[in-house]
Image (cartoon, rainbow, N blue to C red):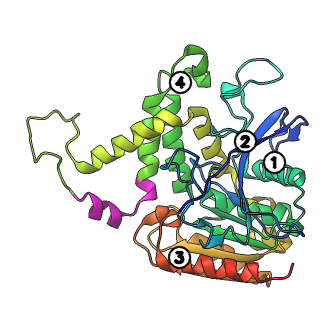
Amino acid sequence: MSFIATPQSMHFAEALPLTSGASIRDYTLAYETYGRLNADRSNAVLVCHALNASHHVAGVYEGQPKSEGWWDNMIGPGKPVDTNRFFVIGVNNLGSCFGSTGPMHTNPDTGEVYGADFPVVTVEDWVSAQARLLDRLGIAQLAAVLGGSLGGMQALSWALQHPERMRHAVVVASAPNLTAENIAFNEVARRAIVTDPDFHGGHFYRHGVIPQRGLRIARMIGHITYLSDDVMNEKFGRQLREGMNLKYSTQDVEFQIESYLRYQGDKFSEYFDANTYLLITRALDYFDPALRHGGSLALALAQARAKFLLVSFTTDWRFSPQRSREIVQALLENRRDVSYAEIDAPHGHDAFLLDDARYMNVMRSYFDSIAKEQP
């Protein structure tokens, strides 16, 4: 059973300096909390979201039974991250389109909608904004920072930017940086968006249109990379919708996989913001903590003080186990406390969101051990 979740927001008047050298002021962060903060404020867990997710991590909204949070199978009473023991915080990142200040909001300096003028943000900037929110909530140290995919990059960055403010980093299906292939997929998706005639250089809001065609294609590209070949074959194979009909146009939808991808693309284009997609994928591309240390991940991670759990999945070719093992090796070189689980799961990158029993048991066991610690 899911509990009732309540969206919250917090406004920040003071400017937040960004990695780019720009800053943003008068911004709002949307967030949700689950469970109760204990007397010594030591049981807080921050959950960082991936590309198209939000602060709505767990629970359902009142009167909306199908509004489960994106990690509702992981977080809640009696679940692996047990909200009977932990105070869990989900934050929507700056530049997103689910409540926090983003490109569709008004720039206080101009009175106009930001659009393409919203400043470039990085993983490090998101961590800085999250830290400010925690300051306001009176949380000096987190029991853990948890994230999957891009959220895992944020958990890793937390360990480097605020090493004393967290006791554990849980990094799931993630990587220390993107491979050239991953950057290439992101670039193709961005090109689909910016070449849509309705994009208008990122100022489509002024024209009362949405670059839906570009967003559809971007989502289709992304979705292909989130699934494994095995899952695609099992779910769709080479099934035709109505049997082979060579009289059809080459532009018609004939295969089930085509129908599925178009459905996913259509749905995505109705709720996601095009400028947000560009911002978040670029933040993914930029993330590379080793860059400032001559390419040495071990040197970058020398400043981390947290204990780590890393989890990867065998069929995840977007964020392969090899990338998690790079982080594990760099932590071991620094004699850090690190646990690693490589789950043999068929679901590809999306496995981190699904109910694999071995995965859930690893997470439950690790958070059980956190709950028993004395900070």
* Amino acid of disc 1: Ala
What x and y, as percent, mark residue 332?
73, 83
Mark 4–mark 3 distance (CA, rounded to whole Å) = 41 Å
The residues bearing labels 2 and 1 have C-alpha atoms spaced at a distance of 8 Å
In percent of the image, x 44 and y 55: which residue is there?
Answer: 225
Dividing the picture into quadrants, the one containing residue 76 is bottom right
In the picture of the structure, the residue carrying the numbered disc 4 is: 199
Q: Are marks 2 and 1 in contact (CB under 8 Å)?
A: yes
Measure the C-alpha gap from mark 2 to mark 4. 21 Å
Say what amino acid the circle numbered 3 marks.
Answer: Tyr
Q: Earlier in the sequence, mark 3 or mark 2?
A: 2
Report which residue position mark 2 lands on: 94
State the residue at coordinates (23%, 59%).
237
Q: Quadrant of residue 57?
A: bottom right
Q: Which residues are magenta?
A: 224-237
**Is tag 1's residue or tag 3's residue first in the polypeptide sequence?**
1
Left or right: residue 341 compared with residue 48: left
Residue at 59 percent across and 70 percent down: it is 323
* Label 4 SS: loop
Task: Depth check: give the residue in front, 286 or 306.
Answer: 306
Q: Residues within 10 Å of mark 4 (few under 14, many from 20)?
A: many
Task: Mark 2: give few (<14), some (14-19) or many (20+) Cα within 10 Å.
Answer: many
Q: Which mark is residue 129?
A: 1
